[in-house]
Image (cartoon, helix red, strand yellow):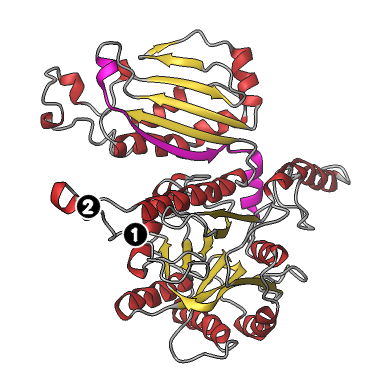
Amino acid sequence: MPPRGTAAVRRLLNITTQARSYSAPADRSIPAAKQKYVPSSGTYPKGFLAGSAFAGVKASNTKYDDLALVVSEEPCPAAAIFTKNIFQAAPVKVSKSWLAKSRSEGQTFRGVVVNSGCANAVTGKVGQEHAEAMARKTDECFSDADETPKTLVMSTGVIGQRLPIDRITEAIPHLHSNLGSTHDHWLDAAKAICTTDTFPKLLSRTFTLPSHPDTTYSIAGMTKGAGMIHPNMGTLLGIICTDAKIDPRSMKKLLDKAARHSFNSISIDGDTSTNDTVAFFANGAAAPPGADPIALATVDERAKVFGPPRLNADTKAFATELSNFMTDLAKLVVRDGEGATKFVTIRVRSDVDYPTAKRAAVSIARSALVKTALYGKDANWGRILCAIGYAPGIMSSPELPAVDFPKVKDSDSLKQVRPDFTSVSFIPADGSEELKLLVRGEPEEVDEVRAKQILEMEDLEILVRLDDFPPPRGDLIRSHEAVMYTCDLSHEYVTINGDYRT
């Protein structure tokens, strides 16, 4: 038999080795390293309110708010993007069906109600009834309530468990009474949707439009997510609101386009959730009387004669603003990756096309071997090349039709990725010279000391050139660039997810 006390010692060692340096503290205080990402003030869109309340959705939570509500004072156009996971959660199905109906009937929405602590995913018919009950109960809190749904619904937390729906519906009137327009109201709502997040993710900013530059508009958004993050929409929950006036028919397209380089360009662990939803509301409350709505259909009339339609200046300006805003919001999710110690930008350039560059970037971002090497401060660039080489769509379709290269006769130029013209570098966050690891298929003599210094930094960029041709050919190519944002993979990730449910 083992000596007395051995089991107790072993338990103590387990507790010590599983100390969570990068996960959310039990008291939900924000770690010192993450406090710089939490805004102390904000400028929020006119006519929108936010708030939070406690329902006790998860049994272990006895005091922290776990319901959030964001609404427009007047119903407004809305759009959303959802997970592509086949096992879609009940709130995804409910919100998606209501939005689909609104596109044909011109229906408007007031906002969205969210619970954390339970995903209400894979919960059958009862789960869908619970999602609808959350939304209907929220609608009843407003004086203009009718049979038409006005509230979208989101849930986040453990999959396969049913909501304590009675506790939630009983708390919703209190949630409604807590609504307000101050920074604290918005921040409280952002905190309430967190699960394993170590800090609330909230952004706001102002902008103007070229046609009436004297008018100041606002856009605000919150998101949650730290694990189960990989593009296929954006593995998280997000709410974005603006007081700009937008044509309802254009909102989904604007959101889809902005998501391509933001929420669809992040990865933490390669897992796409069952609950992903990003909702977008625009109430037009700041628009001056007579202002035209932002619309993708608005074109320069001359373009109809002389070429393809061109978006007008207002639409182009807003599309850029929305894309930049959503990218900054999505980056906060990566910075809070479960157990992560580094924020990594992966930039891939290809002369073939954008999908080729994106396939390579996604594969690198998803590689556990690349991510663990970054955590260990090991410049193991071979893992980067390996991830490119097995990327779906690159490994399975190595050659392109000759028509894509009509002026090039050598067969090597028909490959999506050509090893002899592939280069890899680390780009330091401090602006110093790049550290070349591989140049046109030839390994460099890497300064391991400098490599480790670069990998000690919180931020890092990996630059991959799949089109690093020597002159004169290199001077003539047109590069397509894809960017992914990811993080490293640490012991802590395993600890967090090993006991997440229990």
Q: Name the residue under label 1.
A: 253
* Of residues 355 and 317, the one drawn nearer to the viewer in this rendering: 317
**Callout 1: SS:** helix
Mark 1 residue type? Lys
Mark 2 residue type? Pro
Residue range in magenta is: 473-499
Relative image position of residue 247 (x, y in whole percent): 36, 67
The question of residue 131 being in magenta is answered with no
Q: Residue at (48%, 61%) from the top-left corner?
A: 278
Left or right, 23 with reference to 473: right
Q: Height in image: 192 above or below 385?
A: below
Q: Quadrant of the C terminus?
A: bottom right
Q: Height in image: 43 above or below 345?
A: below
Q: Height in image: 465 above or below 231?
A: above
**Callout 2: SS:** loop
Q: Residue furthest right?
A: 4
Eye-nearest disc, 2 or 1:
2
Q: How many marks?
A: 2
Quarter-wise, where is residue 352 in the image?
top left
Q: Name the residue under label 2.
A: 309
The question of residue 490 being in magenta is answered with yes
Relative image position of residue 210 (x, y in whole percent): 43, 52
Relative image position of residue 239 (x, y in whole percent): 53, 63
Q: Earlier in the sequence, mark 2 or mark 1?
A: 1
Q: Residue at (49%, 45%) from the top-left corner?
A: 267
Q: Residue at (40%, 65%) from the top-left corner?
A: 246
